[in-house]
Image (spheres, helix red, strand yellow):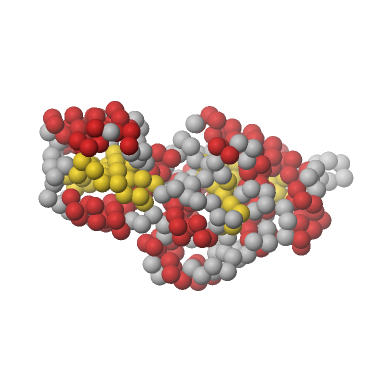
């Protein structure tokens, strides 16, 4: 089953500038956007005819008439991002644009890469109030982040799936070397990525639509084992373009991020709304967690909610842990942490059958712990920041 994705609409206002054709051509090359071209006068006659995700305006300079035009656009379309393209401006003119809360200003001649980044970042910013992206990452290999990501996706899908207007939930497997999410859910994909590995600019909503697989529990899964992606020179661009297209289409996107370093990992972690680090109750795993926490603190984009989940917890005969809670608080500082119980037999059965843990035992202690975390952190985070 495929879910039809709406392209993000870019409204381009033609004000009669000589280089407007170049701007319009740039947008035509961005096939994962829907381009609508009109004049300012036509827009003013029927502003409700357009529902833009971003507005691009090509102007000569920043005079009183241009400022009035930008103010009118802001009045009709509220917080929709506006990208202004013009000749060189002085500091005073740039400040006037900033007062109108323009998303970005680009000087002519426009560089395609910069223009694309401006459009994508503007749309991503505008969508942040209605979409959430959650990164799940193992501190070390085998800690269990993939299992946690699958469980989180299923729980989120169940929570919001009762009301279709709430949107959909995606599980995006970013470990192209294994494609483990697909294997766990018996949804392995044989889709050939060769065309976009060599040319990431071909990625658009139609292409991403071909990649998605709908799980019976409601989440949409993007997972494929293609090891050549990991070593490709285009891997960075491919990953970010795919995420730009996918994440704006779903209310929640859960990213299963590999534990090893990649050239795109820090940029992806900078752009997500929450981070869940999965580790085990041993000192090497905890030390790697501390290193990862330090890396996340230094990322641009401001402070974001980070939680450590200590997986595969086994209580001793008298109920204690090898590393007590006081010590963990000392090590993790102000980063909250919680525990996930070890249910090896249930996990193994779910893996062997290619089903979720809830299909094996809906009363699983592991599921109850992840559900508590999702309700108390991920869904609560959206309610607070929406």
The number of numbered badges drawn on the structure is 0
Q: Is residue 138 left or right of residue 364?
A: left
* Quadrant of the rendering where the N terminus is positioned: bottom right
Residue sitting farthest toward the right? 317
Residue at (72, 41) in percent of width and height: 369
Q: Is residue 270 visible?
A: no
Please identify the quarter of the rendering in which residue 324 is found. Answer: top right
3 vs 305, nearest the viewer? 3
Q: In this view, does 328 lie to the left or right of 102?
A: right
- Residue 196 falls left or right of residue 49: right
Residue 171 in the image: state x and y as whole percent: 58, 52
Is 72 located above or below residue 21 in the figure? Answer: above
Image height of 270 relative to 185, above or below: above
Q: With respect to residue 16, does 223 lie above or below?
A: below
Camera-side residue of 177 and 215: 215
Q: Quadrant of residue 224?
A: bottom right
Q: Tell me residue 363's x, y (percent).
A: 80, 43
| In-front residue for pair 49/283 | 49
Relative image position of residue 273 (x, y in whole percent): 50, 41
Res 4 seen here: yes
């Amino acid at each position: 089953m495929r879910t039809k994705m709406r392209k993000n609409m870019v409204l381009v206002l033609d004000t009669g500038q000589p280089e407007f054709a170049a701007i319009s051509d740039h947008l035509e090359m961005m096939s994962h956007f829907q381009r609508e071209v009109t004049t300012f006068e036509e827009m003013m006659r029927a502003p409700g005819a357009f529902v833009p995700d971003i507005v691009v305006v090509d102007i000569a300079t920043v005079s009183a008439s241009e400022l009035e035009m930008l103010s009118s656009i802001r009045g009709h379309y509220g917080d929709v991002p506006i990208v202004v393209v013009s000749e060189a401006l002085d500091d005073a003119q740039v400040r006037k644009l900033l007062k109108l809360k323009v998303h970005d200003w680009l000087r002519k001649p426009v560089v395609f890469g910069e223009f694309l980044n401006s459009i994508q970042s503007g749309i991503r910013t505008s969508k942040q109030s209605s979409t959430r992206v959650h990164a799940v990452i193992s501190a070390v290999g085998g800690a269990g982040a993939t299992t946690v990501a699958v469980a989180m996706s299923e729980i989120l899908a169940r929570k919001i799936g009762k009301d279709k207007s709430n949107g959909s939930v995606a599980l995006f497997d970013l470990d192209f070397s294994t494609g483990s999410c697909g294997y766990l859910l018996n949804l392995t994909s044989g889709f050939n990525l060769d065309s976009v590995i060599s040319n990431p600019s071909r990625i658009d909503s139609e292409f991403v639509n071909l990649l998605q697989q709908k799980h019976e529990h409601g989440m949409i899964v993007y997972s494929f084992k293609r090891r050549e992606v990991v070593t490709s020179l285009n891997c960075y661009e491919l990953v970010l373009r795919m995420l730009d297209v996918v994440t704006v289409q779903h209310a929640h996107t859960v990213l299963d991020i590999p534990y090893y370093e990649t050239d795109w990992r820090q940029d992806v972690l900078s752009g997500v709304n929450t981070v869940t680090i999965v580790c085990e109750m041993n000192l090497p795993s905890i030390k790697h967690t501390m290193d990862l926490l330090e890396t996340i603190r230094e990322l641009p984009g401001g402070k974001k909610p980070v939680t450590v989940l200590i997986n595969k917890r086994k209580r001793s005969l008298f109920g204690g842990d090898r590393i007590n809670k006081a010590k963990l608080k000392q090590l993790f500082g102000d980063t909250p942490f919680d525990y996930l119980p070890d249910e090896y037999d249930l996990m193994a059965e779910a893996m062997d059958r290619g089903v979720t843990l809830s299909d094996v035992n809906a009363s699983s202690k592991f599921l109850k712990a992840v559900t508590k975390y999702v309700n108390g952190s991920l869904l609560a985070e959206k309610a607070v920041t929406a």
